[in-house]
Image: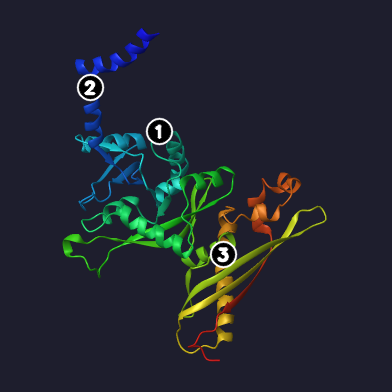
Amino acid sequence: MRRFTLLLYVLPLALVLSGCGLSLASDRHDVERLMLIQTMGIDRLDDRLHVSVSTGLGPEEDPALVMTASAYGIEDAIARLQNYSPENQLFYAHIQYLLLGEQAARQDLSRVIEWVDRSPTVRTDTPLVIVRGTAKDAVTGASEQATDITQRLASLDRQARSVGWSVHTLREAAAAISEGDGALCLAIETAPMDQTIFTDDMRSDAIIPMGYAVLGPDGLADFLTPEASFGAELLTGDPTGLLITVDGCAMEVLEGSAEVKGAYGPDGAPTGVSVRCALRVGVLEKDGDPTPEELDASLSKTVAQWVTDALESARTTRCDFLGLKKALLTTDHALARWGNDWNDIFPTLPVDIAVDGVVDRSYDLPE
């Protein structure tokens, strides 16, 4: 037993002295050569998949390395990207954002989900963002010397979370879609920054949140306007902190809630939907001299329209991204009988919507 124990200590030492220790140095060298990809964008252009990547700003604020390649498959495009950087190993385990261009989101969403699910490196809990336009433009246009797409998205992510928008992951979207329902996903677009503090050689595109994209089993189904996105957030989440504009008045949501109830026939089949929302806001900046009563009425009417727009998208896309099926089919019997046909049933149901909007009194509003 002592002899066996001795061998356990001697063998590693012999391996190092014989030169095998060079592999450890080689491993360290390989780590130094890793280039971490922080943002990946996927597009469908000209019947090919385009993959665009950014490494993010370096530790010394070095400009991000941005590359794009196209092929007929995602893995083939990634292999071509590696050819562009033979001195470094591209590493995808630390991707912070996955962007899908509009066309890829319409045609290749399931393909991307399957690829990530099989990937040994890309995580399914990566935040998913849909780009109105192309992801390539977002990745390359916002990655200049002054900033980088990852930095921009991180700032947008913090801003979205702080004011109440929900940033969803690929896993969350895939789970909702796999159940035959729909999913909401943050949508963005890029725009040139004409007025900027950066110098000409440090200029980059702005990343602008555009509300939610609606994802269904077949891919991207719709883009909600920012206003309809607020209606969807009021129905599905917590809109507290969101900033809205009603009749030129800037308001902050202090409280918001929604109640969805169903009407049912003798056999238990749903025959109608009742939506009741309550909203309390504070005025940040007002236009003109409206009375509090006028603002209350305008707020209620405007938000009711935004909720209507969100529900209308659920009707036309036949995607249950608002979770109405579970809200109205509350028993196992009801789910078993009408659940599979819900996306066909809901568009036929009458919907009654009422919003009780209250504007907090403030010192600059007339009594």
Q: Is residue 347 above or below residue 1?
A: below
Picture quarter with the C terminus:
bottom right
Horizontally, residue 199 falls left or right of residue 107, namely left
Indicate the secondary structure of the residue bearing disc 3: helix
From the image, tell me which residue sits under label 1: 120
Q: Residues within 10 Å of mark 2 (few under 14, many from 20)?
A: some
Identity of the residue drawn at 32% across and 46% down? 38
Q: How many residues crowd mark 1 within 10 Å: few (<14), some (14–19), many (20+)?
A: few
Q: Earlier in the sequence, mark 2 or mark 3?
A: 2
Q: CA distance from mark 1 to mark 2?
A: 28 Å
Q: What is the spatial separation of the Cα atoms under label 1 and label 3, in whole angstroms? A: 37 Å
In the rendered image, the vertical position of residue 23 relative to residue 363, given as above or below? above
Q: Amino acid at mark 2?
A: Gly
Q: Which mark is residue 234?
A: 3
Toward which corner of the image does residue 195 lie, by quadrant?
A: bottom left
For label 2, the SS is: loop
According to the picture, the residue beneath numbered tag 2 turns out to be 21
Residue 238 locus on image (x, y percent)? 55, 63
Where does the image place residue 230, in percent across and percent down from the top left?
52, 65
Q: How many marks?
A: 3
Q: Nearer the viewer, residue 109 or 261?
A: 261
Residue located 37% across and 9% down the image: 2
Between 61 and 350, the residue placed more toward the observer is 61
